[in-house]
Image (cartoon, helix red, strand yellow):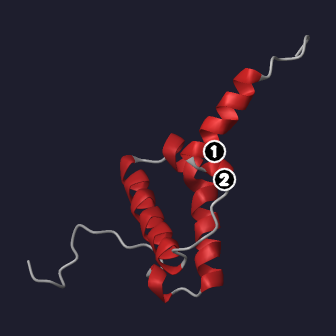
């Protein structure tokens, strides 16, 4: 097989590095919106293609935004703090 032979690979959509930032965000929003239905109801091939495309798009986003803001609650430390404060606060009666 030569370096340009792409049999057996699936490429759907535009190569992510060719999308401008707005197009990339739109593609990411769409693929995340359709994820649940693809997981539940898609064929194995559809799920495989969805996984590959999502990885391509997310990889491109991360490449462009290496210093993206990270919410403290979305880190392991933040999750531990949230869990500790949840268990330290007793539930109100009747909830």
Q: Which residue is mark 1?
A: 78
Work out which residue is located at the far top of the displayed protein and give it. Answer: 93
Tell whether 4 sits left or right of 38.
left
Local SS, label 2: helix
SS state under label 1:
helix
Mark 2 closeness class: few <14, some 14–19, many ≥20 residues within 10 Å: few
Foreground: 29 or 41?
29
Q: Which class describes the residues within 10 Å of circle 1: few (<14), some (14-19), or many (20+)?
A: few
Q: Position of residue 90 (x, y in %)?
A: 81, 17
The label shown at residue 21 is none
Q: Is residue 39 above or below residue 57?
A: above
Q: Residue at x 64, y 67 (%)?
A: 69
Identify the residue at horizontal 59%, vertical 68% (top origin): 28
Q: Quadrant of residue 25?
A: bottom right
Q: Residue at x 61, y 83 (%)?
A: 21
Total marks shown come to 2
Residue 13 placement, left or right of 70: left
Q: CA distance from mark 2 to mark 1?
A: 5 Å
Q: Position of residue 71 (x, y in %)?
A: 67, 57
Residue 67 place in picture, x, y as percent: 56, 73
Q: Residue 64, relative to residue 91: is it above or below?
A: below
Dot 2 and dot 1 residues touching (CB under 8 Å): yes
The residue sitting at 8% across, 77% down in the picture is 1
Quadrant assignment for the C terminus: top right
4 relative position to 2: left or right: right
Circle 2 is placed at which residue position?
72
Nearer-the-camera pick, 66 or 55 = 66
Circle nearer the N terminus (2, 1): 2
> Would you place residue 71 above or below residue 61 in this image?
above
């Amino acid at each position: 097989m030569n370096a340009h032979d792409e049999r057996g690979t699936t490429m759907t959509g535009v190569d992510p590095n060719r999308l401008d930032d707005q197009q990339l965000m739109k593609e990411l929003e769409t693929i995340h919106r359709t994820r649940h239905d693809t997981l539940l109801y898609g064929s194995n091939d559809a799920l495989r293609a969805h996984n590959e495309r999502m990885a391509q798009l997310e990889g491109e986003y991360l490449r462009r935004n290496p210093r993206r803001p990270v919410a403290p609650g979305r880190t392991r430390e933040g999750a531990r703090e949230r869990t500790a404060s949840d268990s330290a606060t007793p539930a109100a009666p009747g909830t």
